[in-house]
Structures are given as structure tokens and as C-alpha cells.
Image (tube, rainbow, N blue to C red):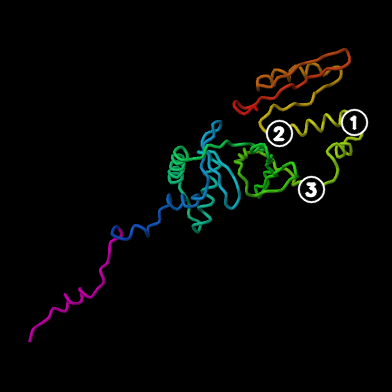
Amino acid sequence: MKKTNTKKRAAADEPVRKSPSEGDEKDKFNPVNEALALVENAILGRSSLRGTYITITEPFHETFLLPSAGFEEHLRNAFFRKHEEKILTRKDCGTVVSVLLSRAKADGIGADIDIRVAALGGAAIYIDLCNAKKEVIKATAEGYTIESNYPIHFLRPQGMQSLPTPESNDSTLCELLQQLYPHLLLSNIVMLAAFLISALLPRRSKPCLAVGGGQGSGNELRRLGPDLRRKGIEVSFNATKRARQIVIERMPVERGNEE
């Protein structure tokens, strides 16, 4: 009768245990790949004026410069919510940004970034409401709509304030201004309406109203002039025996944006 080795047979029946290094690499959690997956549907682009950027379309439409503290904060928060409160380290976040920068420079779209107001082919003007839902107003010759998905890349600098959602009204702008400023002459109401409308025209020089005062205000207005000129704002100073006035004649326009 042949004697068997029970120890060897028992060892053969046991499943083979793989070391951690021999495990399936696909099952390993890679923070960089997971973070890149969070922005796989984002739009990468290059702006001639502001550099590379990324536009997130889910859950809300928002554009960030690359690199920027705003995008890194957005990415860390999204990673934290997606992966059961895991933290994306600064090193991994920097790696993600570097990958996105390379992709944007190689394959990103060549579209500009706008702030607050933008036009698209002359058919529509978009006004950024900068609200919690990142909505914009799309204004055309037929009227306006509130949009949450739009082809414009709006940058929202820190401190930018939200605008109220507009409500339909049968009154004209001049009629509404007359209700707010009943003491103004109609000619001044028309000038004020033109000033407000021009402020919503994208990429143009913006006319400004005159700032004036009575006797004793001349020194203050004169001190204001040099400060404005250093910012590229063209001003003129008018003085008479009864009044002092500083007129802002032209606001600066970003190079390459003037139509």
C-alpha cells in the first residue's frame, strides 16, 4: 500500500494567494484617473487673450482658467463628493491640471472667454446672470429666454455679483426709467436709456455719464482724473464759474476685441 503525503496534497488544494503587487492593476484606485474621469465631458479651449481654460457643463455651466485656484477647488470638491469623502491631494490635483493643460494646448478649441456680456455671430447677445444655477439671458430680435446650456464661455471672477432674473413687461425702457426718475426731462431719459443699452453691447467702447458738482468740487474731480487715466480711461475736465464737471469719454477695450 502506497503512502501519500497529506501535507503536499493539502497544500495543492489551497487557492493560490497573489501578493498585492500581483493583483489586477485595474482594481487599484488611482486618484488622478478618477479625477480626470470627473471632467471627461468638459470642454477644453485656448483663448488668445486669457490663455487655456476648461468649461464644465455638469451640473452647471462654468468656465475656469487653467491653472487656477477656482478650478482646483471645484475639482477637489467634486472628488470629495464622488468618492465617499476621499481627499484629492495637492500633488494629484497638480498632475490632473498638467494633463488638462497639455490636452487644451494640443486639442482645445480656439474660442474666446467673455465676462458678463457676449455676442454670437450677431444673431444673439448673451448676458451672464451669475446666479446659483449659472444661467444666462439670450436676447434676440424676437425677445429673450433664460438659458442653462449655452455656447458661450463665461468667466466669473471672484466678487462678481449676480443679476436679478428679468420679468416680462409691456413697458418700454424709457417708460420704466420715467417711473424711477420722474424729475428728469424726456431728453435726459432717452440719453440714460441709450447709456444702459450700450453697456450691454459686447466688445465695444462704453460711453459713460458725466460726473459733475458745484463750486468746491473742482479739486476732488481733478484728483479723480489722473487715477482714471492710469487705468486707460480717457477723461476731460470742464470748469465754469458755477459748476465743475469731469466727463469719461472712452473706456478701455481689450486688444483685439474692438469691432
Q: Magenta stretch?
A: 1-20
Horizontal and vertical percent position of residue 30:
40, 53
Q: Residue at x 67, y 43 (%)?
A: 130
Q: How many marks?
A: 3
Q: Nearer the viewer, residue 259 or 103?
A: 259
Three-letter residue code for mark 1: Leu
Q: Counting other residues with Cα less than 10 Å from the Cα at mark 3, is it few (<14), some (14-19), or many (20 or more)?
A: few
Q: Which residue is mark 2?
A: 201
Three-letter residue code for mark 2: Leu
For this view, does 12 lie left or right of residue 121? left
Three-letter residue code for mark 3: Glu
**Extreme residue toward the bottom, this view:** 1
- Mark 3 and mark 1: Cα distance apart in space: 24 Å
| SS at mark 3 in the image | loop
First along the sequence among labels 1 and 2: 1
Horizontal and vertical percent position of residue 107:
46, 40
Q: Which residue is mark 3?
A: 167
Q: Which residue is mark 1?
A: 186
Horizontal and vertical percent position of residue 47:
54, 34
Horizontal and vertical percent position of residue 255:
60, 25
- State the quadrant of the C terminus: top right
Q: Is residue 118 above or below residue 224?
A: below
For this view, does 3 lie left or right of residue 146? left
- Mark 1 and mark 2: Cα distance apart in space: 23 Å
Q: Residue at x 40, y 56 (%)?
A: 29
Give the foreground label among 3 and 2: 2
- Mark 3 and mark 2: Cα distance apart in space: 20 Å
Name the mark on residue 68.
none
Q: Nearer the viewer, residue 205 or 96?
A: 205
